[in-house]
Amino acid sequence: MSSYRDMIGDWDRAVRAIEQRDWLSALSHLSRITDPGSKICFTLGCVRLRTGDLPGALKAFDQTIAKDDRLAICFFQRGAVHLRLEMLDEALGDFKHALNNLRGNSVIDYTQLGLRHRLHSWERNNTFEPVDVPEGIVFKPRKHEVDELNMKDFLGTPKVISSVDPNDSFAGFKPLCPRKLGEQVVRGTRGYHYLPIDFTPKTASEVEAKAGSVVFVLENGEDGWSTVIANNQRGLIPTAYLEVWAGSRGNKQRQVPGNVSQTAPQAPASRPTGTEGAAHSKTVTSAARSGKDCLLPETVIIKVHYEYTVATRVQPGITYTDLLSNFKSKLGRQSGQIQLSYKDEEKQELIMIRGDEDLDRMWNQIVDRRLTLWCKCTDPLSGRQVLYQTLALYDYNGPGAEDMEFNEGDIIDVLSEVNEEWLEGHSNGNIGIFPRCFVSPRSSVIADS
């Protein structure tokens, strides 16, 4: 037994064939319907009548009346077949049944039933030539039933809008695939790249770059975006827009203000009084976590709720400073401090992460290699005056905790001149001291922040 969908489909295809006067194709489509209704049987009888198969047409009309004995138009059409077969008594009986099923009406309009035809009664005192339903006039399925045969896409076409794998374009359901080796690994790594096409920023965290321009990649995020220096500005550009610049493989001297060479100077040996700090936190953190990494997964997907939600994959051994830097670039925070918190499952409350010790306790909240954090941002320059701005000529990674790290090309806000050799400044949301010889003053003087 054919399904309702198949029945409507074959019926509609048969009607289209009838409109083209392709009677054999119409007959083939109608014959595939295993349990036709009265309207389809009537259509089949009309097709057989046009092909000259009078016995077949008579059988089809018999089936129609067996399914609906009040269909006057079928009695009328079967009477026409009986006339052609010279079965006059049967023809007279059919016409009488057709007249009786008019139920006293002078006309029946079958348009609402899908048959573009009207059946009229006649006057007994007048004589007419025998007629039948005109060629090609058959019952048709309702339009909305035919329209529903086409599959409708209520969900739309899926696409990847965010993935921990920047090369992942699969929009179905499957585990994350490992990153392929090859050009994708080289593209976006720290160094010089060029853009083959223009990139126009859509948010404040992104930076504009023209086709053919050379940019310096500082960090390649796992969300498909790279932090770059372009036109003396730091911002985000999609990694897919970047191509490795051939000139970066040689020993290229980049021109910087003051024609200073690429070799970084030595930091002053004397440091400002009261700024001696402990060793950099990376060393302390690595020692504190020795023997614990084996209990944690190699990587964890961290989702951070901010004004919007971002996600990235990190290693549980990452330091607090690196974690803040990672999310600061993804949140597009060029200035300001971010405060991260995690939810303690036992206490059901948010715990602020202030350093590496809190970070160690945070890893205990990992479930299925996933972790959710909440983020707030504060402005570190609140109440501080920016004296002027400088441009970083070299990378600086200070040994002390009070030092402010920055990269070549970063814009640094100078907050105070500690002495002749050291400055206090702000860059990328961090405040600290740095050697004056690592930067060059910018010509423009800005107002109070």
Image (cartoon, rainbow, N blue to C red):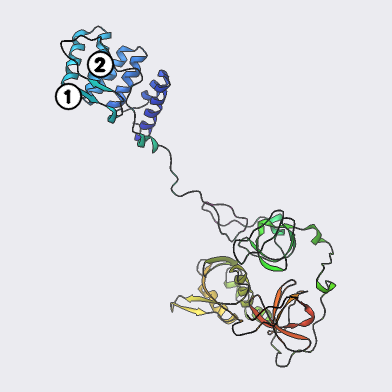
Quarter in which the N terminus is drawn: top left
* Amino acid, disc 2: Arg
Q: Are marks 2 and 1 in contact (CB under 8 Å)?
A: no
Image position, residue 308 (x, y; %): 52, 67
From this view, report whether residue 359 is shown above or below residue 70. Answer: below
SS category of the residue bearing label 2: helix
Q: Is residue 321 left or right of residue 149?
A: right
Residue 317 visible in the picture: no
The picture quadrant where one finds residue 283 is: bottom right
Residue 169 in magenta stretch: yes
Which residue was labeled with disc 1?
A: 105
In the foreground, 326 or 318 = 326
* Amino acid, disc 1: Asn
The picture quadrant where one finds residue 390 is: bottom right
Region in magenta: 166-177
**Sequence-wise, which precedes: disc 2 or disc 1?**
2
Which residue was labeled with disc 2?
A: 78
**Mark 1, residues whose alpha carbon is within 10 Å: few (<14), some, or many (≥20)?**
few
Quarter in which the C terminus is drawn: bottom right
